[in-house]
Image (cartoon, grey):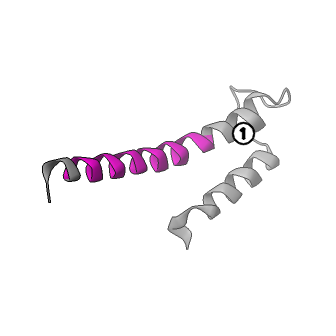
Amino acid sequence: MPVQSCRQVSNYYTHLINNIVNNDVLLPFQIYVEYVVKNPLCRLDEPIQSELFASKLDTYIRSLNIFD
């Protein structure tokens, strides 16, 4: 395989892996911000007691490919 082709394949997989990792890492934080930080009833200095947050996070985690 020519060097240029190897670089293209390597760049493709690096980009793909970065997108997967970024989405898998960022989405739980987005869920946290949406259902805990923006919720005036949730205090950030106390344990999270939001059932909606727990439900959304559980749904997200169960949707990951690791559970297929």
Q: Is residue 18 above or below residue 33?
A: below
Secondary structure mainly formed by the magenta segment: helix
Q: Quadrant of residue 40?
A: top right
Q: Position of residue 67 (x, y in %)?
A: 55, 70
Q: Could you tell me which quadrant the C terminus lies in?
A: bottom right
Residue on which the image places disc 1: 48
Q: Residue at x 70, y 59 (%)?
A: 59
Q: Residue at x 72, y 39 (%)?
A: 48
Q: Could you tell me which quadrant the N terminus lies in?
A: bottom left
Q: Which residue is farthest bottom?
A: 68
Number of other residues with Cα within 10 Å of mark 1, as a class: few under 14, some 14 to 19, many 20 or more: some
Q: Is residue 63 magenta?
A: no
- Name the residue nearer the viewer: 30 or 23: 23
Q: Residue at x 71, y 31 (%)?
A: 46
Would you say 18 lies left or right of 68 here? left
Q: Is residue 27 magenta?
A: yes
Q: Is residue 47 above or below residue 61?
A: above
Q: Secondary structure at mark 1?
A: loop
Q: Which residues are magenta?
A: 6-28
